[in-house]
Image: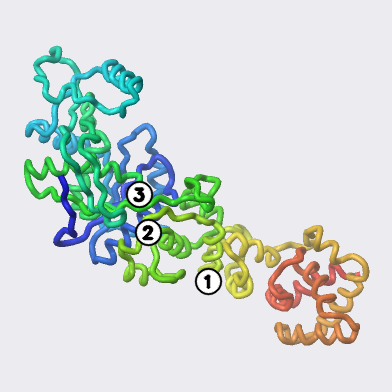
């Protein structure tokens, strides 16, 4: 059976359906983004479904983290989240409809019988799949009161073709899809049934997900088409199966490549949401040679034709480089608030906002901004790094005394005036400017790296800057 899907008439509806057994990982975040962008591009709706039917592994902490991660990325949804666990009764109702209409049947095979069947298949090196032993049997043959599952009666002849918006035409022989369980012996629905029913009831028109779900599409379509025969208005969705993300070395993405939860990029790596948004957008989708694309441009440009067929490679260094660009473009007051929150007690947002133009210039993440801002809030006597202490050896302290005396007489505490005074002193002493700047930097910051030394003087203020130089001068 082959059926080329075309875009359904009416509104485009997409969905993101994570399982809350862990945090929002990078692959899930990209799937959510692509669904969100496709719906927004077409003026449609995008919905969130929490697939929490695995009660043992699903946690409220993971649910909260997923929702928080989506909000941080700026992905909003057009309805409150739907929880799959609340809909078991509806899922079972569809299973019984399929049974009544002859598209499903009761299977009384015991776990022991099924395991013996699989053992025989393994011995004969056959695919492990249900052999249909109860497909055409009369349920009356089963012992009275025996437990049973409900299995879907899948087509076992011909083939099914899916015209996927990313993968193209994909064909599977129907005999490869066995009659799988849709309702367990305890009356609970299986994942395959729940997904199909929820997508239908939510009005989902486009299923955009990882290509590890492509095989599921061939298992889910028979339910959709059987229900369409029973009651109508169960159209095939449009499928778009996105290649997975690999590590920078081409191997399957793992934690060693940076496959962490979205919150880790925010909290541990100091990445801005707009940078991660842009990076995920370009991870498997492209528009010419554009690297930086705003949210508004992404909505205007996004289409499934731009999604590549090959796995994309996640590279934390490229993400940090992109993040550095966004840091330089970000509002200083906003960055000051983010950095102050990381520094904690004693952080002065006003001072940080003034310092931000020089702090963010070379930083690739918020952690580097925090590190660069440390000198602003250091207490005397300053702790010195080993390299900084080395810059204060020899005649450096005597030089600092001369610097102190020269700057103490400076009334115009601006970077231009301070630079002119320091250069004049260097010429007077017959020294290069670096000979003065290096011990000054050590005395003022306790490190060997900092913003421009005259910016440091201005940001610290006259009294504090002179006190730090005096403390290290001979």
Front residue of this view, candidates 13 and 437: 13
Residue at image position (14%, 35%) is 93
Spatial separation of the CA atoms under disc 1 and disc 3: 38 Å
Q: How is the image coloured?
A: rainbow
Instruction: Specify whether 1 is left or right of 216.
Output: left
Kindly identify which numbered label has been placed on residue 461.
none
Quadrant of the rendered structure where residue 172 is? top left
Residue at image position (74%, 87%) is 417
Quadrant of the rendered structure where residue 212 is? top left
Of the two numbered discs 1 and 2 on the same chain, state the one appearing first in sequence. 2
Residue 197 appearing in the image:
no
Quadrant of the rendered structure where residue 400 is? bottom right
Residue at image position (15%, 62%) is 10
Spatial separation of the CA atoms under disc 1 and disc 2: 38 Å
Q: Secondary structure at mark 2?
A: loop
Of the two numbered discs 1 and 3 on the same chain, state the one appearing first in sequence. 3
- State how many labels appear: 3
Residue 241 appearing in the image:
yes
Say which residue label 2 marks.
308
Spatial separation of the CA atoms under disc 2 and disc 3: 12 Å
Of the two numbered discs 2 and 3 on the same chain, state the one appearing first in sequence. 3
Q: Are marks 2 and 3 in contact (CB under 8 Å)?
A: no
Kindly identify which numbered label has been placed on residue 210.
3
Front residue of this view, candidates 440 and 183: 183
Numbered disc in front, either 1 or 3: 3
Q: Position of residue 405 (x, y in %)?
A: 86, 80
Q: Secondary structure at mark 1?
A: helix
């Amino acid at each position: 059976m082959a059926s080329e899907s075309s875009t359904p008439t009416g509104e485009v509806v997409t969905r993101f359906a994570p399982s809350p057994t862990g945090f929002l990982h990078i692959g899930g975040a990209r799937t959510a983004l692509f669904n969100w962008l496709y719906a927004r591009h077409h003026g449609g709706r995008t919905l969130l479904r929490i697939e929490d039917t695995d009660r043992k592994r699903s946690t409220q902490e993971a649910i909260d983290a997923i929702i928080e991660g989506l909000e941080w990325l700026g992905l909003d949804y057009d309805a409150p989240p739907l929880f799959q666990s609340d809909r078991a009764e509806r899922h079972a109702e569809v299973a019984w409809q399929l049974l009544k209409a002859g598209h499903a049947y009761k299977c009384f095979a015991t776990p022991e019988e099924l395991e013996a069947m699989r053992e025989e298949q393994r011995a004969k090196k056959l695919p492990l799949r249900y052999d249909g032993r109860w497909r055409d049997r009369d349920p009356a043959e089963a012992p009275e009161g025996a437990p049973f599952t409900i299995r879907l009666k899948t087509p076992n002849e011909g083939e099914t073709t899916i015209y996927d918006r990313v993968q193209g035409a994909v064909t599977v022989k129907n005999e490869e899809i066995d009659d799988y369980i849709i309702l367990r012996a305890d009356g609970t629905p299986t994942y395959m049934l729940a997904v199909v029913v929820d997508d239908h009831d939510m009005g989902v028109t486009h299923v955009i997900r990882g290509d590890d779900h492509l095989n599921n599409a061939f298992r889910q379509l028979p339910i959709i088409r059987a229900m369409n025969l029973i009651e109508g208005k169960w159209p095939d969705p449009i499928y778009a199966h996105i290649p997975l993300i690999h590590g920078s070395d081409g191997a399957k993405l793992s934690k060693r490549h940076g496959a962490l939860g979205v919150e880790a990029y925010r909290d541990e790596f100091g990445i801005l949401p707009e940078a991660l948004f842009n990076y995920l957008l370009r991870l498997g989708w492209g528009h010419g040679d554009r690297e930086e694309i705003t949210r508004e441009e992404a909505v205007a440009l996004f289409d499934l034709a731009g999604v590549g067929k090959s796995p994309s490679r996640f590279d934390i260094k490229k993400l940090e480089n992109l993040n550095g660009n966004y840091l330089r473009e970000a509002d200083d007051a906003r960055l000051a608030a983010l950095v102050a929150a990381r520094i904690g007690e004693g952080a002065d947002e006003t001072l940080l906002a003034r310092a931000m133009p020089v702090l963010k210039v070379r930083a690739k993440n918020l952690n580097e901004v925090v590190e660069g801002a440390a000198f602003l809030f250091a207490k005397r006597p300053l702790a010195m790094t080993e390299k900084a202490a080395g810059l204060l050896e020899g005649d450096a302290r005597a030089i600092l005394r001369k610097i102190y005396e020269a700057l103490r007489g400076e009334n115009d505490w601006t970077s231009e005036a301070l630079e002119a005074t320091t250069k004049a002193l260097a010429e007077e002493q017959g020294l290069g400017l670096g000979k003065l700047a290096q011990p000054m930097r050590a005395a003022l910051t306790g490190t060997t790296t900092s913003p421009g030394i005259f910016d440091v003087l201005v940001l610290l203020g006259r009294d504090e800057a002179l006190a730090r130089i005096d403390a290290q001068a001979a």
